[in-house]
Amino acid sequence: MTKTINLTLKVWRQKDSDDKGGFKTYSSRDISTDMSFLEMIDVINEQLTLDGEDAIAFDHDCREGICGMCGAMVNGRAHGPEKGTTLCQLHMRHFSDGDTIVVEPWRAKAFNIIKDLVVDRSALDKIIQAGGYISVNTGGAPDANTILISRETSEKAFDGAACIGCGACVAACPNASAMLFIGAKVSHLALLPQGKPEAARRVMAMVREMDRLCFGNCTNEAECEADCPKEISITNIARLNREFLKSGFFSSTK
């Protein structure tokens, strides 16, 4: 038998980026504990629509923890209380009957609020455009065994590549730093031979773009690692710092 719970939700509502915004309280009854958090919001939105009110705007796409679109602060935690979980994977069984849940958007200078829980995260795309890629000739894919890579190195690179760019690290960080995001992107390219020719230019360009977009810097608070839905390690930030120092040294000797 499916269990149901009754909840009180305090949701941030904001018409647009110029609106002051504020919390609005909703009562949500008979919510199935089998629902995901986003499905719970869907139910509330159905009722709001029937009542002639605007539905709560929120980002979503695949709802499988892959795309990185979903994201909100739930009771002060990015993506909610469960470790290694995106908002769309957070199920209502992790809450209790009678709970009050506070839901608000990512808070960062680089992330402008568009409406309600929807924020503009295109700043992360601009960082990728600045250097998060490799330049290769087009054509057929090379044979996988042409360049041998150790298992340890490939696994470290894969761990960095697991980043979905959701922005939880920025939202969780008291400095609104994007260094875990950049560290993951720099790591998975810098560790592999295909990414080494542009390594110095890449890290300088991405860090420069991060500063231009008004992200903060890392002060080793580690909230980013704690709230990352893909559990990206802050060792990637250490690798980012090493790559940045190396790039500065090589550029100064040219």
Image (spheres, rainbow, N blue to C red):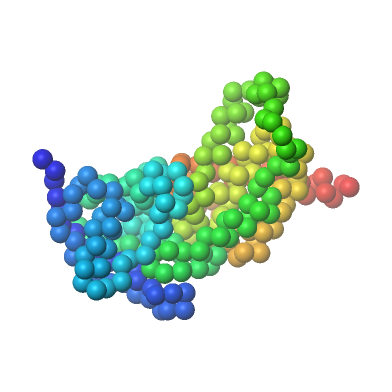
Q: Is residue 132 above or below residue 50?
A: above
The residue lying furthest to the front in this view is 139
- Quarter of the rendering occupied by the N terminus: top left
Rendering quarter of residue 43: bottom left
Rendering quarter of residue 26: bottom left
| Residue 158 appears anywhere in the view | yes
Residue at the image point whose x is 59% and y is 34% from the top: 157
Residue 160 x %, y %: 56, 39
The residue lying furthest to the left in this view is 1
- Number of marks in the rendered image: 0
Residue at the image point whose x is 27% and y is 63% from the top: 45
- Of 234 and 90, the residue lying toward us: 90
Q: Decide if residue 198 is on the left or right side of residue 219.
A: right
Q: Is residue 134 above or below residue 57?
A: above
Residue at the image point whose x is 14% and y is 55% from the top: 30
The residue lying furthest to the right in this view is 254
- Of 42 and 26, the residue lying toward us: 42
Residue at the image point whose x is 75% and y is 37% from the top: 137
Residue 21 x %, y %: 38, 76
Q: Decide if residue 71 is on the left or right side of residue 131.
A: left
Residue 185 x %, y %: 60, 44
Rendering quarter of residue 40: bottom left
Q: Is residue 140 above or below residue 248?
A: above
| Residue 223 appears anywhere in the view | no
Q: Is residue 136 above or below residue 146?
A: below
Q: Decide if residue 126 is on the left or right side of residue 107.
A: right
